Amino acid sequence: MRDKHIVLASGLSIGITDIDNKIKEAEYNALNYFNKTCPYCGNGIFDGHIRNKLNLDHFWPISKGGQNVPWNILPICGRCNRKKKDKLPHEYLEPLTLEICTKYLSEVRDRYCNETQKCCEMIAKIKSSIINDTTLTTTAAMKVLLDIFEINIDFKTSSRFENDYTSEWITSGDWKYNLIGNQVEKSKVYEMYLTHCKSNNLSPDSVGEFGKKFFKLVKCKSVRINYPELGIRPWGYRLI
């Protein structure tokens, strides 16, 4: 796979990934657009002698500054390709044919540039909205990403994302309402989490999976919490 970087007249530099396949795509599109006729002479590209069949022409010759890009490629008949050689478009084509071909290739160029511009804008949004924002939870980052790509998913009903709510809930810190000093009972934290899942129609993680995520996201260690007056020592989290 080869990439091609093109500097446009505006000074904008764009990159085309897999340039060989893009040129094949441009060739196919042009054949359909001109109904398999030569855009220069109007004859059928696949008609007649094999020497007159399809040739790829660089509309603006490579030898005179043209580039090997989709908007400088036209499939033409062999006869026109032999006649044109490295002539400039206006040196070989009739004014009306020149106008038609120029208009078509300009539209091809605009399409590729617009797609690239849109891609650049998406990358900029991802960088500013997700990569540079270290406070985003996994689920929040996924929501932003899907919004950028204009993909609609109901997180409450999609099993692909619902367990991300576990990390999001832990990170939100709602469980801190049960902190006594720097300690909190594991059972109380999990009960709060189950209430959250129930109210949002989410499938909760098991106790074990929840604990793994809690230790991953919160700096703490597992301890026994003493309640001398009650005579119990439940397991808890102690913040570090």
Image (cartoon, rainbow, N blue to C red):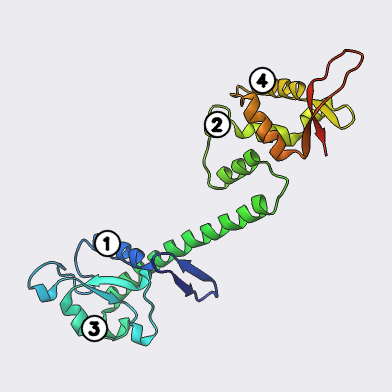
Q: Residue at x 49, y 74 (%)?
A: 8
Q: Is 45 rendered above or below residue 220?
A: below
The quarter of the picture where the C terminus appears is top right
57 lies left or right of 10: left
Q: Earlier in the sequence, mark 4 or mark 1?
A: 1
Mark 2 and mark 1 in contact (Cβ < 8 Å)? no
Quadrant of res 112: bottom left
Judge from the rendering whether residue 109 lies leftward or rightward of residue 89; answer left or right: right
Judged by depth in the image, the label closer to the viewer, 4 or 1, is: 4
Residue depth check, mark 3 versus mark 1: number of the one nearer the observer = 1
Q: Residue 6, percent across and down?
A: 47, 73
Instruction: State the residue position of label 3.
Output: 84
Q: Earlier in the sequence, mark 1 or mark 2?
A: 1
- Label 2 vs label 3, nearer the camera: 2
Q: Which mark is residue 199?
A: 4
Circle 2 SS class: loop
Give me the disc on residue 131: none
- The residue sitting at 36% across, 64% down in the picture is 22
Is 9 in front, or is 19?
19
Checking the image for residue 28, the label placed there is: 1
Q: Is residue 128 left or right of residue 104?
A: right
Which label's residue is closer to the chain start, 2 or 4? 2
Marks 3 and 1 sit apart, C-alpha to C-alpha, by: 22 Å
Mark 3 and mark 1 lie on one chain; the one further toward the N terminus is 1
Gap in Å between the C-alphas at discs 4 and 1? 54 Å
- Label 3 amino acid? Lys
**Amino acid residing under circle 4:** Ser
Q: Which residue is mark 2?
A: 154
Tell me the crowding category of disc 1: few under 14, some 14 to 19, or many 20 or more residues within 10 angstroms, Cα based.
Answer: some
